[in-house]
Amino acid sequence: MQKDNHSRVALSVSRRAVLQSSAVTAAGYLSAHASIAWTAPAVAANKTVSEAKLRPDLLDDKSPPGLEVVQLTTDGNVPASHLYMEAQIFTRDSKHFVLHRSATAHGGSRSDPKHRYLRCDLDDNYSLHPLTNELGATAASVSPDDKCVYYFVDQTEPGGGRLTLKRVNLDGTGRETILVIDSPLPDTNFRPSRPYPLSTISSDGKRLAISAFLGDGQTVGAPYGLMVFDLEKATVQLVIHGPTWCNMHPQYCRSLDPVGSHDILIQENHGNVATATGGITRLTGGEGADIHVIRDDGSDFRNMPWGRDGNEFCQGHQCWRGQTRWAITSTSCRDRQEAQLIEGLAGSHAGHVGIKTSDGVRNDLSREFSSPHFYHFATDIEGRRLVSDAGPLGKDASIYLAHLGEPGTAPASNFTYLLRPQSTCEKTAHIHPFLSPDGKMAFFNSDESGMLQAYMIRGLENY
């Protein structure tokens, strides 16, 4: 491949056939679930035109040798974006993942007819393939067996409407409806609306969770809650709810351990203010948010030992460390004016005391980095590599790669500057870097071209 400023990656020129949508009963879903196997399509008619182009101009004198930057989406009329950093969107072989067009860094609009989830084939010239065609498609997750993508269709309104859980094979075939929620959730009077733009799936592929607003549109201080779907039985259960769960950010632990695979990381926004229709007018107040872990049946509620002491505040960005039961958060600290990366292991819930949780374990990963200002980050699946943006946020923000040592004790090491994405870093254009499962590629957003687009960095295996 040539390395001129805007050289095109080899393109595929044929069009994908129009996706067809179909609905089946829950029983139909169960019979189909066990028999579907996916392999990357080899038929040229199933490909879109690749938009990718090499962007060596985004590297600079500080960038290490051997890196290549690829701009994956290039439509100057429609923005595109990666999903949020911890979203479960990759196949295990690190060759295929999901992103979306006509979307910002924080999601798409349910009323936007241009919004689509796309599969990107990294081993096929970065070709892009539409996976959804419904208005209101949201919260996509790739199944751990790489066979399909689960997503929701949002036709809700406070106190009413319809939320539909669907799945489609990763090659775009076999679209199915699993469950429709158009009445109160079981054993409650709550109807979900305003679903969170991310879902999360258990490591065994049997359960999927998403949070939503539960108000009727008239009641001030109405709750939000976490729904857990049993994908084999096509059922749903509300496992926790309350007015402070307005930005829950749920994330299933990716551990393969039978116990750990039921844990969900959730964020509680103390002091938040919301309208009667679920719009958030203030995210937190006082000592800010804290982070908890809950079992997906609603039991075993625990604390992560972060924030809530008047000095350390959780930014609201956290993720599991690979497939371990350790998690990482970014903080802001008043005493040192830093934004640190703190690792933690959940402890018992004895009030919303955060850092003061007596049996919680914490480890400052960024303690050997001079004046850390980290915000958005993610790890590889082994929990041994980490990528993060670093402030000041704006066009001077940069991306770093780091190695992670022994959980709970070792600081992050070998911090390597990669590049400046040159994004404005406005809320709709956050960089949100993350890694492929194998840690060899990093991905980020930028509006450096004047339009938000999705990018990747390859060659990280050398660092």
Image: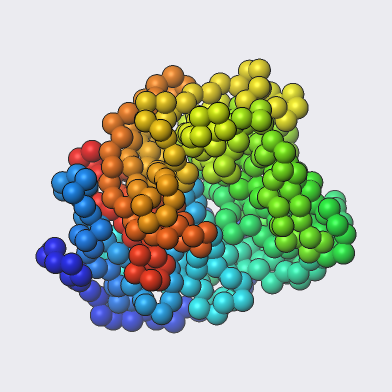
Q: What residue sits 33% from the left and 76% below the top? A: 48
Residue 235 versus residue 110: which sits nearer the camera?
A: 110
Specify whether 354 is left or right of 12: right
Residue 169 versus residue 116: which sits nearer the camera?
A: 116
Q: Position of residue 131 (x, y in %)?
A: 46, 70
Q: What residue sits 15% from the left and 46% below the top? A: 65
Residue 73 versus residue 228: which sits nearer the camera?
A: 73
Count every numbered label the image shows and give the total: 0
Q: What residue sits 25% from the left and 80% below the top? A: 13
Specify whether 321 is left or right of 438: right
Residue at far left of view: 2
Q: Position of residue 244 (x, y in %)?
A: 75, 45
Specify whether 422 is left or right of 262: left
Q: How is the image coloured?
A: rainbow
Residue 326 appears in the rendering: no
Quarter in which the C terminus is drawn: top left
With respect to residue 39, does 131 lie above or below? below
Quarter in which the N terminus is drawn: bottom left
Q: Position of residue 219 (x, y in %)?
A: 88, 59
Picture quadrant where residue 277 is located = bottom right
Q: Position of residue 26 (x, y in %)?
A: 66, 62
Q: What residue sits 21% from the left and 45% below the top? A: 62
Residue 356 appears in the rendering: yes
